Each structure stands twice: as C-alpha cells, then as structure tokens.
Image (tube, rainbow, N blue to C red):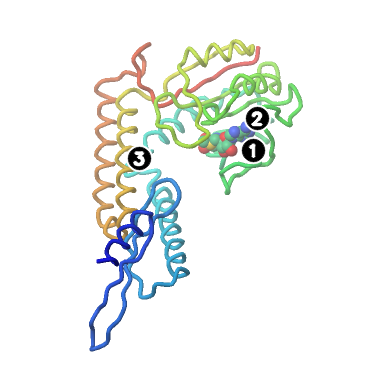
C-alpha cells in the first residue's frame, strides 16, 4: 500500500517508477513502468517500459523520445509541406504566388537585401545579381542561409545602396517595427522597393511573436517613414484563412496526442492527414464560392502583402 501511495506521489511530481513483480519462466523479474514528463513546450507523459530502474536509462529514454518527436515534426514538414496534407499548405501557396507576381517589379536587379532571411524561401522568385540574406546572430534558424549577420534595427548596410528590401514574416517578431521600417527606408536607393509580408490572423507561434497588423496600421507606419504605398493586399480571403487556422488547431491536437502515446498515436496519423486535406479542400472551395479577398473590410486574411516605394 505504501508503495502504491509512493508511486502516485512520484507520478504526480512528474516522474517514475511503478514496480511490478513479474513471474515468468519461474524467474521473478522486476519490470519498471515509467511515466516520463518531458520538459519543454507541452508536458508530455509518455509510457515507457524499461527493464531496469536506472536513472541513466530513463534519461536516455527521455532524450530518445524528444529526438524522435523533433524528427517526427521535421519529416512531417519536409514530406508534406507542399501538399494539401500539410496544415500550412495554403499559407505557402498563397505567399509564394503573391511574391512571384510582384518579384519582377523590383527597383533594380543588382542588390536585394532579404532581412530575417531564414532559409531564403523566395530565392527562386527574384532574378537579381546579389540576393543578400541577413539574419540575427541568435536566430533560431540553425540551417539559415544568411550571408550577413546583424540587427534589423541598425542594418550593417550603406545608406541608399539596395534596390529591393524583402522582409517576409519578420515584422510581427520585432519590438520596434517603426525603427526597422526607418532602416529599410535608409538602405534603399531612391525608387527602390520594399516587399513585405506579415500575419494578420494567425496563432501566436513563438515567444518573440509580438504584433499583428491591419492594412491601415501598415500604411500608417510606412507613410510615416516616408514610403509611398503601391499595394497593401490580403494574401487570401476568409475561406483559406479559416481553413489554415482550423488546420493549425487540428494538427496541434494531433501531434499532442501522438506525443502522448507513441507509437499508438502514429497509427492515427493517416486520419490526421486526411482531415487536414479535407479542411484544405473545403477552404479552397469557399475561397472560390464566396470570394472575400477584394472586400475592403471583414476579410479574415491570415497575412498581408506590402509593396512600397522609396520616393
Ligand atoms: C519567421 S522567421 C521568417 C524567415 C523568412 N523570412 C521566411 O519568410 O521564412 C523570422 C526571422 O526574423 C529574424 N529576426 C527576428 N528579429 C530579428 C532582428 N532583430 N534582426 C534580424 N533578424 C531578426 C529571425 O531570426 C527569423 O529568422
């Protein structure tokens, strides 16, 4: 009875052993069942059956599960990101399509500065001599394709030297967005273009996710820094945006469940993929049947595209 209470207390504080006596082949063997809490985003109890009670073994198992989960997410993204089975499918398609449409209007074809470039997802869209990627030295993008490290609030670039500034999915992560826009204005040549995307309706996605912008807010900030606005447009209408949000929600639940009980959760993965694809399809149909992108108000666009010129 004491052992039982001890087990409950140990389990409640997050970790470990229920000890069973197992009779098999005439030998009494101890089998330990642990409920492991992985530190990190979610507390993740995972059922583990180990043949030893050594803490080192438990640590190893925890690490293995953490790695497996990271690999699971990594491969999910790699395999499905360009297919309707991925929660971010419409986001990718609409962002790439919109940028491809305006890539040719850049101020010149010499220097493009991709600020907060990550892995330069729009490299192929621009035909410039120098696509310079800039990243913060403490970026979370370990496989980033930066050519230059520096801070967006004091770009290590000469004034009036850049033809096009590209800044995708960065503005919402900045504490002083106004200061960054002033910097874009400073480094651009006269007649140079600023191309930017930033979310409007999208879940908080990391601890540096500070702001969301309406088209009017973007217009105000850009004009205040001296830009002429050529275009501020929703990247998609409400149908696509609702599908995207619902899919992020469904995928979060799906992966949470998977984490709880690997490998049982993996069995349900095809169901999750099927659900994601169905939601994407419904979003696509709604976008065609009830187009909302061109309304002035009430557009739940997940993201906006900005094209501004330094006069
Ligand atoms: C969501 S990622 C976007 C990456 C890429 N532009 C894209 O569209 O996939 C935001 C990027 O902004 C960078 N960033 C955030 N704050 C920054 C700063 N103060 N200076 C330079 N880069 C910054 C981050 O390192 C990160 O790579």
Where is 305 relative to 14, above or below? above
Q: Residues within 10 Å of mark 3 (few under 14, many from 20)?
A: many
Residue 116 in view of the camera: no
Residue at 35 percent across and 75 percent down: it is 51
Q: Please, what secondary structure does the residue beneath circle 3 have?
A: loop
Q: CA distance from mark 3 to mark 2?
A: 30 Å
Mark 3 vs mark 1: give the one in front: 1
Does mark 1's beta carbon lie closer than 8 Å to ligand 1?
A: yes
- SS label for mark 1: loop
Q: Position of residue 122 (x, y in %)?
A: 53, 36
- For label 3, the residue is 87
Which residue has dot 1 on it?
Answer: 136
At mark 2, the secondary structure is loop
Image quadrant containing the C terminus: top right
**Disc 3 versus disc 2: nearer the observer:** 2
Question: Could you tell me residue 261's position as x and y percent?
Answer: 30, 57
Q: Quadrant of ligand 1?
A: top right
Contact? badges 1 and 2 (CB < 8 Å): yes
Q: Position of residue 241 (x, y in %)?
A: 34, 28
Label 2 C-beta lies within 8 Å of the nearest ligand 1 atom: yes
């Amino acid at each position: 009875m004491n052992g039982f209470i001890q087990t409950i207390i140990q389990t409640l504080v997050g970790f470990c052993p229920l000890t069973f006596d197992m009779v098999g082949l005439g030998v009494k063997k101890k089998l330990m069942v642990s409920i492991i809490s992985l530190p990190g985003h979610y507390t993740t109890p995972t059922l583990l059956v180990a043949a030893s009670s050594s803490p080192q073994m438990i640590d190893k198992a925890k690490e293995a599960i953490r790695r497996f989960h990271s690999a699971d997410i990594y491969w999910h993204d790699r395999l499905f990101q360009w297919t309707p089975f991925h929660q971010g499918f419409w986001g990718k398609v609409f962002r790439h399509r919109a940028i491809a449409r305006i890539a040719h209007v850049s101020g010149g074809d010499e220097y493009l500065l991709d600020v907060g470039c990550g892995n330069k997802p729009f490299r192929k869209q621009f035909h410039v001599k120098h696509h310079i990627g800039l990243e913060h030295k403490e970026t979370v993008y370990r496989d980033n394709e930066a050519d230059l490290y520096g801070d967006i609030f004091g770009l290590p670039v000469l004034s009036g030297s850049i033809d096009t500034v590209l800044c995708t999915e960065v503005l919402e992560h900045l504490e002083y967005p106004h200061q960054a826009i002033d910097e874009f204005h400073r480094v651009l040549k006269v007649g140079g273009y600023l191309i930017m995307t930033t979310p409007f309706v999208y879940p908080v996605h990391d601890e540096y996710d500070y702001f969301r912008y309406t088209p009017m807010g973007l217009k105000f900030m850009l004009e205040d820094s001296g830009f002429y606005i050529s275009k501020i447009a929703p990247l998609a209408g409400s149908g696509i945006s609702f599908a995207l949000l619902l899919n992020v929600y469904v995928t979060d639940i799906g992966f949470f469940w998977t984490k709880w009980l690997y490998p049982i959760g993996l069995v349900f993965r095809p169901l999750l993929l099927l659900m994601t694809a169905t939601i994407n399809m419904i979003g696509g149909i709604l976008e065609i049947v009830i187009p909302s992108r061109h309304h002035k108000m009430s557009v739940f666009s997940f993201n906006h595209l900005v094209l501004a010129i330094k006069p």
